[in-house]
């Protein structure tokens, strides 16, 4: 496995270090146990959520000491207007730990992890990291077209007016053959956001 | 064939360059009957010369790209038939971006945040598959119904509404 996929990043946050751990395709029992406890404690799971599916979407986790304080999840989705498949990214930080840069650190870690994994698994054809920005605080406080640290760049707006951002992997290639597809019903509300996404 | 030389002409109103470009457009039948020549000439951004002959013309139209809620410079590029070369196109686009980025920084009141282009990928070979073109940074942000790519490169510190 490439060194990048094994690396743990340590970042200083106040007086505590944050430990970012890879979770993508690992079925790590410690992270999965901690994530489910964390989500339930934070009321982060929707009533209809399939926890098994959610756990299988885990990309990375952030720990402060032994406590899990944030999770990152990814699901591969075809994006019609971009004619490619992106790893659609979501991040959840414990309420009392927000606005400390943990989401940014976790996003950078997850981005690099997915880029390395994608490069090693070209058969999956995932060419970038995508995100729908749901944080009102982030949108109000940072009006840059390209986020300086995560490099997520604005490509358009969803039907509900939420920003859609993409970080293209270095090896990203767009298919010229895109015969169309049908969105499947999933337990993610990303599906609604992506119908007729990015209207010019 | 010697490499063409590139001349940046954004908002220069260089009479000799304008005369040469008019000849290029005329020869290539690129002017419609109702075209406003003054407006078109004001859009000139980069010209490529092979000796005394114009072989490529790049123009930029400042316009709001509603998809991203921002004002951008929409680029067009016309290449002479015997100079349809991807390296030349890339060089022209890079110089165009450099010029416009510099101009936008000196004219913040214009709020021009990047460059964009609608690209017909036929004839581009594998270049058309690359999600991001370097060094210009033009990245795919969408597709038109006919399959043309819409590409956009944000200027540093570009802001959105």
Image (cartoon, coloured by chain):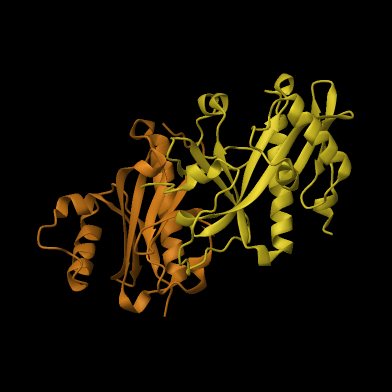
Chain colours: A yellow, B orange
| Coordinates of residue A69 in the picture (x, y in percent) | 78, 29
Name the residue furthest front.
A48
Residue at left 19%, top 73%? B27
| Coordinates of residue B29 in the picture (x, y in percent) | 18, 71
Q: Is residue A174 above or below residue B71?
A: below
Residue at left 51%, top 42%? A164
Judging depth in this view, the residue of A41 and B56 nearest the camera is A41
| Coordinates of residue A151 in the picture (x, y in percent) | 60, 43
Name the residue furthest left.
B33
Examine the rendering and report whether any part of residue A153 can be seen: no
Q: Is residue A123 above or below residue B68?
A: below
**Is residue A102 rendered to the left or right of residue B43?**
right
Q: Is residue A76 above or below residue B82?
A: above
Residue at left 47%, top 66%? A178
Judging depth in this view, the residue of A148 and A193 nearest the camera is A193
**Is residue A46 rendered to the left or right of residue B74?**
right
Residue at left 45%, top 55%? A81
Task: State the image quarter where residue B21 is shown.
Answer: bottom left
Query: Which quarter of the figure is the N terminus of chain B placed in?
Result: bottom left
Examine the rendering and report whether any part of residue A38 can be seen: yes
The mark total stands at 0
Judging depth in this view, the residue of B149 and B89 nearest the camera is B149
Task: State the image quarter where residue A33 is shown.
Answer: top right
Judging depth in this view, the residue of B59 and A125 nearest the camera is A125
| Coordinates of residue A3 in the picture (x, y in percent) | 84, 54
**Is residue A111 rendered to the left or right of residue A191?**
right
Query: Which quarter of the figure is the C terminus of chain B placed in?
Result: top left
């Amino acid at each position: 496995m490439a060194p990048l996929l094994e690396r743990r990043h340590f970042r200083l946050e106040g007086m505590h270090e944050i430990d970012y751990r890879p979770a993508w395709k690992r079925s790590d029992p410690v992270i999965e146990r901690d994530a489910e406890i964390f989500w339930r404690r934070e009321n982060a799971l929707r009533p209809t959520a399939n926890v098994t599916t959610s756990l299988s979407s885990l990309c990375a986790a952030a720990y402060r000491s032994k406590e899990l304080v944030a999770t990152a999840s990814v699901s591969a989705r075809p994006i019609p207007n971009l004619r490619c498949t992106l790893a659609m990214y979501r991040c959840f930080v414990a309420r009392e730990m927000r606005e400390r840069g943990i989401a940014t650190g976790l996003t950078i870690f997850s981005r690099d992890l997915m880029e390395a994994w994608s490069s090693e698994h070209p058969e999956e054809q995932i060419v970038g990291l995508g995100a729908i920005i749901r944080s009102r605080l982030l949108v109000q406080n940072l009006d840059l077209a390209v986020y300086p640290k995560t490099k997520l760049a604005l490509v358009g707006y969803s039907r509900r007016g939420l920003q859609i951002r993409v970080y293209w992997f270095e090896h990203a290639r767009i298919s010229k053959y895109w015969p169309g597809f049908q969105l499947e019903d999933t337990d993610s509300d990303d599906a609604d956001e992506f119908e007729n996404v990015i209207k010019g | 064939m010697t490499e063409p030389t590139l001349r940046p002409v954004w908002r220069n109103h260089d009479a000799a360059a304008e005369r040469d470009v008019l000849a290029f457009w005329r020869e290539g039948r690129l002017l419609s009957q109702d075209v406003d020549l003054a407006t078109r000439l004001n859009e000139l951004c980069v010209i490529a010369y092979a000796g005394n002959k114009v072989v490529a013309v790049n123009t930029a139209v400042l316009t709001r790209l509603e998809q991203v809620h921002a004002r951008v410079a929409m680029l067009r590029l016309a290449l002479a038939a015997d100079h349809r070369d991807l390296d030349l196109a890339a060089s022209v686009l890079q110089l165009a971006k450099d010029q416009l980025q510099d101009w936008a920084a000196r004219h913040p009141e214009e709020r021009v945040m990047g460059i964009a282009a609608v690209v017909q990928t036929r004839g581009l070979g594998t270049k058309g598959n690359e999600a991001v073109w370097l060094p210009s940074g033009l990245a795919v942000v969408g597709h038109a119904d006919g399959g043309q790519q819409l590409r956009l490169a944000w200027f540093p510190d570009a802001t959105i509404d």
